[in-house]
Amino acid sequence: MRIGIDLGGTKIEVIALSDEGHELFRKRVDTPRNDYEKTLKAIEGLVLDAEKATGHRGSVGLGIPGTLSPFTGKVKNANSVWLNGQQLDEDLATLLGREVRIANDANCLAVSEATDGSGAGRKTVFAVIIGTGCGSGIALNAEAHAGGNGNAGEWGHNPLPWPDEDEIRFAQEVPCYCGKSGCVETFCSGTGFEEDYFRLSTQRLKGAEIIKLANGGDPVAELALGRYERRLAKALANVVNILDPDVIVFGGGMSNVDRLYQTVPLLLKQWVFGGECETPILKATHGDSSGVRGAAWLWPQGRFTL
């Protein structure tokens, strides 16, 4: 049995999967924000709940909004800042009495979709989270690729390529939380989409509300969505030029905008080198469950021993 944990800023979710990938147990609790020790205990409690409910002991994989430094072994780049600088894998291994594998949450999405989702059977899967933030993960042969610095897939914190005058102005006026400006995240996250609509309309609306207006023919909402699609296509063209993945999979709130799967592949061709691009862009099969499922799949079959 595999146990996966998705450690988010507001909730922690556990899932238990059989070796065949069937869901056996699921539960979520609120994240003890800004309290590392309580976070550890919450994870321990969820693992014990899963094992009690199923009657089986399992491997444990954990997805986090950050990564483990390959140099210090400690968490870095986590927007759940109380995790940064902590030896999370070793602390959990001590609590649970077994090795715990940890990966970035977007990498977990990529692993999940590469294993039995929209990227199944594909060698290179580039998975994108376009929600409150904007990140990505890479799965090679259904295994997470973190890179030598632990930064593989940090697509959201590269500059938007080929910016026009309005995008240059946006970058100057809307800095990224990372301390830099012009990051893909400021343009292509759901938050960035909402900000651009506000700049066009002076109205603060949620992404779903803007999409509803666009679907109803509202010209300002349609303008904001068209700009979003163009920016997303440019940012993904950069990925195709460097990695050329076999498939791109969307997760996060903006992944539910169905027209993206028709418009963005066509727009990609304008910026991909050579003008040719048939890379499929697909919605995550497992939706919001992909992250926690991917954490469970950090242990391939037959690799776990108690």
Image (cartoon, rainbow, N blue to C red):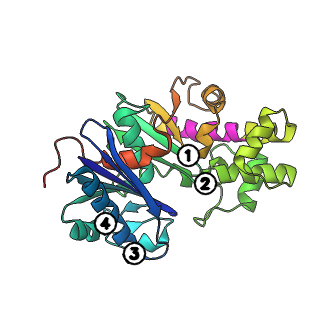
Q: Nearer the viewer, mark 2 or mark 3?
A: 3
| Circle number at residue 283 | none
Query: Which circle, 1 or 3, is nearer the viewer?
Result: 3
Residue bearing the label numbered 4? 44
Picture residue at 37% right of the left edge, 35% below the top:
114
* Residue 234 part of the magenta segment: yes
The correct choice, above or below, for 55 with respect to 99 in the image is above
Q: Please report the residue visible at 81 percent of the width from the left and 41 percent of the height from the top.
A: 221
Q: How many marks?
A: 4
Q: Quadrant of residue 151?
A: bottom left
Residue marked by disc 3: 38
Q: Which mark is residue 132?
A: 2
Q: Quadrant of the C terminus?
A: bottom left
User: Disc 1 versus disc 3: distance between alpha carbons?
Assistant: 27 Å
32 or 129, which is in the foreground? 32
Name the N-terminal-most of marks 2 and 3.
3
**Secondary element type, mark 4:** helix
**Sequence order check: which comes first, mark 1 or mark 3?**
3
Instruction: Give the side of residue 294 with respect to residue 253, left or right.
Output: left
Label 2 or label 4, whichever comes before in sequence order? 4
Mark 2, residues whose alpha carbon is within 10 Å: few (<14), some, or many (≥20)? some
Q: CA distance from mark 1 to mark 2?
A: 8 Å
Give x and y (percent) for residue 123.
Answer: 34, 31
The answer to whether the residues at label 1 and label 2 have Cβ atoms under 8 Å apart is yes
Q: Nearer the viewer, mark 2 or mark 4?
A: 4
Q: Amino acid at mark 1?
A: Gly
Q: CA distance from mark 2 to mark 3?
A: 25 Å
Span highlighted in magenta in the image: 228-240
